[in-house]
Image (spheres, grey):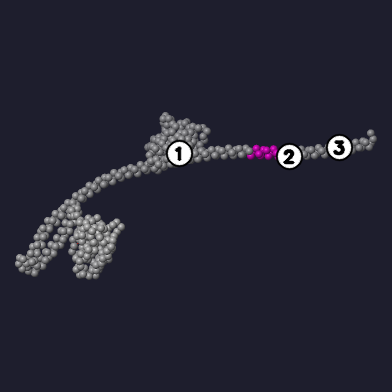
Amino acid sequence: MSSDTITILFLVSCISLIGLGLFVFYKMKQMRKLQAEATNLRQSLEEMDEQAKLIVRTDMELNKTQEELDKKVAGLYALQRFSRAVSTTLEENQIFSRIETSFLEDLGFEKALVFLWEGPSKFRNCLNIGYPEEALLAIQTLMEAHKDLYHTLIEEGKTISSISKLSVGKEQMNRVLKVSAFVISPIIPREGAKGFLLVGTENTDIIITEGDEELIVVLANQLGQALENARLFEKTWKTQQELEIKVEQRTHELRNVLSEVEKISKRKSDFVSSVSHELRTPLTSIKGYAAILLAGKLGAVPLEIKERLEKINRHSDELAHMVNDLLDISRIEAGKVTMKLEPQKLKDILEKVTDLLAVQAKEKQIELKFGLAPEAETVFADRNQIERVLINLIGNAMKFTPAAGSITVVARATANNMAEVEVMDTGCGIPQESLDAVFEEFYRVENQINQEVKGTGLGLSLVKHIIEAHGGKIWVKSVVGKGSTFSFTLPLA
Ligand code: ADP
């Protein structure tokens, strides 16, 4: 082999080695890149795995929350139904009978008890769902043994459950109550016995949540409210019964008093009537004899005796007038006077009355005015009696109105088919406290005019009797020093 060939071979080998070296370097670089990519991929995979786990966990939690929400919504619906039913119940027993097994199941429980605190050491059982008699006795004994705990619950309005911290052994409670989870909530009506509601379940899958506790608190509050309503109703009902009895007794007493008053009033009327009758005959004789003497039929009468006889005559007239009024009042009161009701023109009656009183009006310079509405023209009345009414009212108005005053009589129709007649004067007026009393027999206002003017206090009483016998009413309004208005009603013809 020539040295050239060897040199060429050597050169070829060197180039091949360099090429190989370059190839190896290139591959190694690629491998490192691939390794870096593989590490990145692994990290991404791990991250994705974490995220997938998180998604699964979140999904599970969401499902659980959804389940709890569904449970709570079902419970709330059940509570709403219960609330509606119990709000119309006003008897204690019926309130508890509204808690049925299906309703309890909607709340997630199958056992329930209600105890109300009756006296120093006894709980009264008012509701029992799911416990046989002997189990109930055992529970009652346990409760009475721990009564302080229950009293504290009631006093503090506190709710406990299997998830609360308790001073009483939870295992013992679960064992005696035969449940794996329970809630106890106080029932606190504002009146009467307080107590508590206990609900429980044997289902070990059920774990009591705060939401469950809240639902039972609402239920216990509703029971408290319903008991309060029932007790209030009972109290109101009892009070009403007592009131009814009292009203009945009072009515009976009043009826007796009324019949006594009627008897006395009748006796009074009879007495007044017979005395008036008895007075009439001697009065007529006195008047007769006085008239004979005055006429000089028994010889000449000296002036002094004549004056006395005239006084006797005048006083006898006044007495006869009073006796007649008294007799009329007692007759009308006894229903012995029948009013001869006929259509009468108010204008005609008023004209006659003003004729009778014209002299008196002229003497005192009193102006008499009338204003009769056409629709109140004709009334249904006993003419003579209404004449007496108007003579009395207008006569009084003249008596108590100073000279140069005025008297106005108006009449109008009212909505209930009556005529309302008003006699207004510009006289001395009547004090407010005497307005009703003026219609009583023998009542006269104590004033200067009454000391000077004669009167019996019978006129307005008679007027009132006559108006009422016509089915009307009479009243007076007055301002002292300004005048009075006497108003009365009569049926329109
Ligand atoms: P008498 O007029 O005979 O006293 P009445 O029964 O007619 O009796 O009236 C009772 C009292 O009512 C009168 O004494 C008088 O005090 C008061 N009275 C009646 N009418 C009027 C009037 N128009 N103005 C003021 N007082 C009156």
Q: How far apart are marks 1 and 3 (CA)?
A: 94 Å
User: Disc number at residue 16?
Assistant: 3
Q: Position of residue 43 (x, y in %)?
A: 69, 39
The residue that label 1 is drawn on is 185
Give the left or right position of residue 307, taking residue 360 as reference. Answer: left
Q: Does the magenta stretch include residue 39?
A: yes
Q: Give the range drawn in magenta.
A: 37-51
Residue 275's x, y, as percent?
A: 13, 55
Q: Name the residue under label 2.
A: 36
Q: Residue at x 11, y 66 (%)?
A: 310
Pointer 3: residues within 10 angstroms few (<14), some, or many (20+)?
A: few
Between discs 1 and 3, the one toward the N terminus? 3
Q: Nearer the viewer, residue 164 or 47?
A: 47
* Residue extending farthest top: 134
Q: What kind of element bears circle 2?
A: helix
**Which of the two residues, 167 or 383, is positioned nearer the viewer here?**
383
